[in-house]
Every structure is written in C-alpha cells, then in structure tokens.
Image: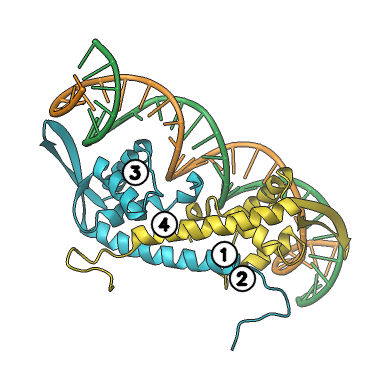
Chain colours: A yellow, B cyan, C green, D orange
Amino acid sequence: MNPDALRGHMDALLLSVLEREPLHGYAIIEALQERSAGALSVPTGTVYPALRRLERTGSLASEWATVGGRRRRTYRLTDAGRRQLEAERSAWREFAGVIGSVLRPDLGPGVRPAG
Amino acid sequence: MNPDALRGHMDALLLSVLEREPLHGYAIIEALQERSAGALSVPTGTVYPALRRLERTGSLASEWATVGGRRRRTYRLTDAGRRQLEAERSAWREFAGVIGSVLRPDLGPGVRPAG
DNA sequence: GGCTACATATAGAGAGCCTACATGTAGTCT
DNA sequence: AGACTACATGTAGGCTCTCTATATGTAGCC
C-alpha cells in the first residue's frame, strides 16, 4: 500500500474505528489491521500525532487509564467527531466515485454503455 | 475536493486520460474535468510537474508541436506507461476496497451481514 | 489598448505520512 | 540475571507531492 495514497484519508479511518467504542492508540492500530484484513499497517509515528491532531481540533477527547501496570490514553468520539465522520464518509464516496470514473478503462470510440 | 486526497492518485489519473490518445497538458486538464463531470479542477502547477515526472521515470514520452501558432508539448503513453497504468488501476481497486471496508458504517454488535 | 482563451513553466509554501529513535512496564525463557 | 517479545506512548526530522502565485507568450475579439 503506497503511503501517499493514505494522505487525507487517515482522519476518516481513525474516526471510523472509534465509532462503536473508545480505544487507545495501540488498539486502534490493531483494529485498522483487522478491519482491513491485514492490508493496513499504520506506524505509530503516523497514528499518535494524528490522534492528537484530532483531539486538538475537537473531534476526539481522551482520558488516561492504567491497565495491567501500563498507561493508556483512551480516545473517544465527540459529537463534533461524529459529525466529522459522517462528512468524511460522504467525502470518501464522492472521491471514490470521481477517481473511479476517470480511471475506468477506456474502451475506445466505438464502445459505449448499454442503454 | 480536498487536495490532500489526490495525493498518490495523480499519476493514475494522468495515465488514464492518455490511454486512448496522446494529449498535451492543457487538454489533459480539460479531459480530467470532463471525465469527472466537473469535479476535478487540477491546477497547472500540479499537472505540468507531474507530467515531467512521469516522463523522467519513463511512463510517458513527449514531442513538441505548433498548432495555430501556439506551442504544445504532446504526451503519450510508453509501453512502460501502459504497464504502470494497469498497476495503478489494480492498486486503486485494492485501496478503495480497503478504505471502504474500514469506513463502512459500524452497525453494532447485534447486526451482521445476511447469510 | 484591454480582455479572454490557449499554452507552458517554475519557485516556494504547506501539510501529512513515514523512518528512526527514545522511553518504560510486564511476562517468558534460558 | 539477562535477553527477548508484546504492550504502550511519544517526538524529531525527512520526504514528497500538491497547491498558490507568478511569469511568459500567442491568437482573436471588441
């Protein structure tokens, strides 16, 4: 997976895995792997700064917890975060539609869609 | 359309519009607009450097022409470019599948796909 | 002379993702 | 004890691509 392709879609991914339940950074990385059937291995250097960015802009909120002697920072969606997630979803649908329509193999001048 | 989202997909778009016939930069920009029903307005400062990059890496070749007193640099796909286009298409399909599967609305623990 | 469309090009800014590194706990194996 | 792995967070710096802004020039219309 070309890293550049993820650009601008990271926020959507993070918000999406936090939709059902709050998670901490490490668990978010695992959740992304699971949901993508192993295709997404997002490094910590990407995820942690992105989570802080989303908290700073008000889409996420976090609390510290200690579990089994280890410190975790657990993130949850705010109301603004839920609204942003919906916006990201519709932006993705539009984006995928546009790219898909441009990328669709060019069948040549004699061929057109059935209709 | 968030500019960051285009990151890493520009090459695919350019190669794709050049698949059927060679075009010069200005015409490529118009073709992108047409194929995307007006959604893609890619600025010249993006397209021209990207075309040169693709030529430098061997996916495109170009020739100068003068039409109506104006100079054009016309780009065409090389064999390597056609191979790259196929690779970009399958990369896009994979990418869209992965993002889509992560973004799919989380319906909660009690809901699962029919089957 | 001024405006728009056509046509190419570059410099510099901006932003985000990645690599690499730093730090620390808990548990297992030898 | 020592080494290693899994768990867990964080930052600094680099890289690359896209965008904005600007420059240059022809052709045609008013």
Whole-percent x and y of residue D14? 52, 39
Bin the neighbour count of mark 1 within 10 Å (Cα to Cα): few under 14, some 14-19, many 20 and up. Answer: many
Bin the neighbour count of mark 2 within 10 Å (Cα to Cα): few under 14, some 14-19, many 20 and up. Answer: some
Amino acid at the residue labelled 1: Leu
> For numbered disc 4, what is the local secondary structure?
helix
Residue B50: mark: 3
The residues tagged by marks 1 and 4 sit, at their Cα atoms, a distance apart of 23 Å
The residues tagged by marks 3 and 1 sit, at their Cα atoms, a distance apart of 27 Å
> For numbered disc 3, what is the local secondary structure?
helix
Whole-percent x and y of residue A28? 69, 62
Could you tell me which residue is drawn at 43 percent across and 67 percent down? B93
Rendered position, B68 above or below A29? above
Q: Are marks 2 and 4 on the same chain?
A: yes
Q: Earlier in the sequence, mark 1 or mark 4?
A: 1
Q: Are marks 3 and 4 on the same chain?
A: no
Apparent side of residue D3 relative to residue A9 in the rendered image (left or right): right
Confirm or deny contact between disc 3 and disc 1 (CB under 8 A): no
- State which mark lies toward you, 3 or 4: 4
Residue matched to label 4:
A98
Residue matched to label 2:
A35
- State which mark lies toward you, 1 or 4: 4
Confirm or deny contact between disc 2 and disc 1 (CB under 8 A): yes
The answer to whether residue B108 is visible is yes
Amino acid at the residue labelled 2: Arg
The residues tagged by marks 2 and 3 sit, at their Cα atoms, a distance apart of 33 Å
> For numbered disc 2, what is the local secondary structure?
helix
Amino acid at the residue labelled 4: Val
Residue B74: mark: none
Q: Chain of mark 2?
A: A
Confirm or deny contact between disc 1 and disc 4 (CB under 8 A): no
The residues tagged by marks 2 and 4 sit, at their Cα atoms, a distance apart of 24 Å
Residue matched to label 1:
A40
